[in-house]
Image (tube, rainbow, N blue to C red):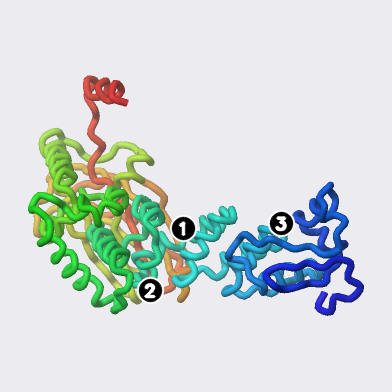
């Protein structure tokens, strides 16, 4: 191959020449059909290759042709996209598969967006899926300025809408991450540190607010309109349930006021149902409801020890305390035992639907170990506690990331007339 010995065909492309052998080239679907059909190239000894794909360069062609002469090819991660492009053009299935495996093994903050886009272009669905998983796990647990800059609107929409997004703290932190991301999409030349990013973004949006009439939100402006579809996937009901967060949302004026009025109304009715209609919470697991409307929250445990916390926000009088101790994770419905800054429900029993996930990551953001409870319903009496996960010490690698999905109220039952009206409208 390297010396072109006994070559019976010359391939010219991108200003280079390769003296090759038809018997080897026929392993490629591209050349096989070229030589066996009634193409004029089938009898030619010099073939000029048109290379329509700009990802393909001379080095990628060299490795792709060379792969026909030997079984194993060493693929450098920095070269994998160019090589994948060449392998797809030449229809080299084995090499395409090898590129896919290399990509899956080397996903990190620097490569993930490029790999995701290339996997979409060249039809590697399993790589695309792996990149999406990596982003769901790392977008909030390991935030970075570079990653925010690279994430497209469509990709961010997929991440924010997912119930599998590994949220750190609460939904308000998802909003804050989106604010930082939107600022970087609009001002890509900004190159400060992650620590400075939020205050810079806030200052930039505050300046824009002065340019608009009072009644228009940033997302309704010409500049903000492109991002509307991403922000629609925020679960606003879990942001406005906390006073400090609700005030920031109102102050920022990024989100259209109609969205907020509708959520305030929805939450008010949910509270009245819990207070006056004895809604004790979800009765059964409704996966669609849980995935689309659950509260998403999380916590990082830096090292082994005893932890006890609650996530902020008013949850209809259900004060949920979470404890990690001796490798157990415990949920407690605090009612009268411990002080609580808000009002608590005195209903004898309350239900929550939940899913709890744990994960540890290596330095490139790949999951080392993970556990999940799956979706469950838990019934708790006043001040009752329940172990929800018992961990094997061999699986415990710190820092440990905990992520939960919760539903505290059952979905509102539609009256017959409402259901009929909805059917007519659809």
Mark 2, other Cα within 10 Å: few <14 / some 14–19 / many ≥20: some
Q: Residue at x 28, y 24 (%)?
A: 425
Residue drawn at (11%, 38%) of the image: 272
Disc count in the image?
A: 3
> How crowded is the residue under tag 3: few (<14 C-alpha within 10 Å), some, or many (20+)?
some
Q: Residue 152's image quarter?
A: bottom left
- Judge left or right: residue 167 versus residue 112: left
Q: Is residue 238 visible?
A: no
> What residue is shown with label 1?
132
Looking at the rendered image, the quarter that the C terminus falls into is: top left
Mark before the other along the chain sequence, 3 or 1: 3
Q: Nearer the viewer, mark 3 or mark 1?
A: 3
Q: Secondary structure at mark 3?
A: loop
Q: Which residue does the image show at 86% across and 63% down from the upper left?
A: 45
In the rendered image, which quarter is residue 49 located in? Answer: bottom right
Mark 2 or mark 3: whose residue is earlier in sequence: 3
Q: Nearer the viewer, residue 166 or 19?
A: 19
For residue 91, the mark is 3
Horizontal side, residue 19 vs residue 211: left or right: right
Contact, CB < 8 Å: mark 3 with mark 1? no
Quarter containing the N terminus: bottom right
Q: Nearer the viewer, mark 2 or mark 3?
A: 3
In-front residue for pair 296/202: 202
Could you tell me which secondary element the residue under label 1 belongs to?
A: helix
Single out the mark in the foreground, 2 or 1: 1
Q: Is residue 38 above or below residue 279?
A: below
Q: CA distance from mark 2 to mark 1?
A: 22 Å
x, y percent for residue 27: 81, 59
In the picture, the disc for residue 399 is: 2
Q: Position of residue 176 (x, y in %)?
A: 24, 63
Give left or right: position of 219 versus 371.
left
């Amino acid at each position: 191959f390297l010396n072109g010995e006994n070559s019976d065909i010359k391939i010219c492309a991108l200003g280079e020449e390769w003296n090759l052998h038809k018997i080897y080239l026929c392993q490629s679907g591209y050349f096989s059909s070229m030589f066996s059909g009634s193409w004029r190239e089938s009898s030619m000894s010099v073939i000029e290759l048109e290379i329509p794909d700009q990802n393909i360069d001379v080095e990628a062609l060299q490795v792709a042709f060379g792969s026909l002469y030997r079984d194993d090819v060493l693929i450098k991660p920095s070269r994998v996209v160019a090589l994948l492009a060449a392998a797809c053009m030449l229809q080299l299935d084995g090499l395409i598969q090898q590129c896919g495996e290399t990509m899956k093994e080397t996903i990190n903050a620097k490569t993930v967006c490029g790999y995701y886009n290339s996997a979409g272009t060249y039809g590697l669905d399993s790589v695309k899926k792996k990149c999406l998983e990596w982003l769901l796990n790392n977008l909030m647990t390991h935030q970075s300025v570079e990653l925010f800059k690279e994430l497209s609107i469509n990709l961010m929409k997929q991440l924010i809408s997912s119930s599998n997004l590994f949220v750190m703290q609460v939904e308000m932190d998802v909003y804050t991450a989106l604010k930082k991301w939107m600022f970087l999409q609009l001002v890509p030349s900004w190159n400060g540190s992650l620590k400075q990013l939020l205050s810079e973004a806030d200052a930039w949006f505050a300046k824009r607010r002065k340019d608009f009439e009072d009644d228009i939100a940033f997302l309704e402006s010409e500049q903000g309109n492109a991002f509307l579809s991403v922000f629609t996937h925020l679960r606003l009901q879990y942001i406005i349930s906390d006073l400090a967060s609700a005030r920031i949302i109102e102050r920022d004026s990024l989100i259209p006021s109609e969205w907020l009025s509708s959520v305030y109304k929805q939450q008010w009715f949910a509270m009245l149902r819990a207070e006056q209609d004895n809604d004790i919470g979800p009765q059964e697991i409704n996966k669609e409801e849980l995935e689309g409307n659950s509260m998403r929250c999380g916590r990082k445990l830096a090292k082994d020890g005893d932890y006890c916390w609650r996530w902020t926000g008013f949850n209809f009088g259900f004060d949920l305390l979470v404890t990690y101790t001796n490798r157990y994770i415990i949920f407690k419905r605090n009612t009268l035992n411990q002080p609580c800054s808000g009002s608590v429900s005195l209903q004898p029993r309350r239900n929550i639907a939940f899913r709890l996930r744990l994960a540890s990551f290596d330095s490139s953001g790949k999951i080392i170990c993970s556990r999940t409870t799956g979706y469950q319903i838990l019934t708790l009496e006043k001040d009752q506690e329940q172990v929800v996960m018992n961990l094997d010490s061999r699986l415990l690698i710190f820092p440990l990331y905990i992520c939960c999905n919760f539903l505290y109220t059952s979905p509102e039952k539609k009256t017959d007339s409402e259901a009929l009206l909805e059917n007519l409208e659809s």
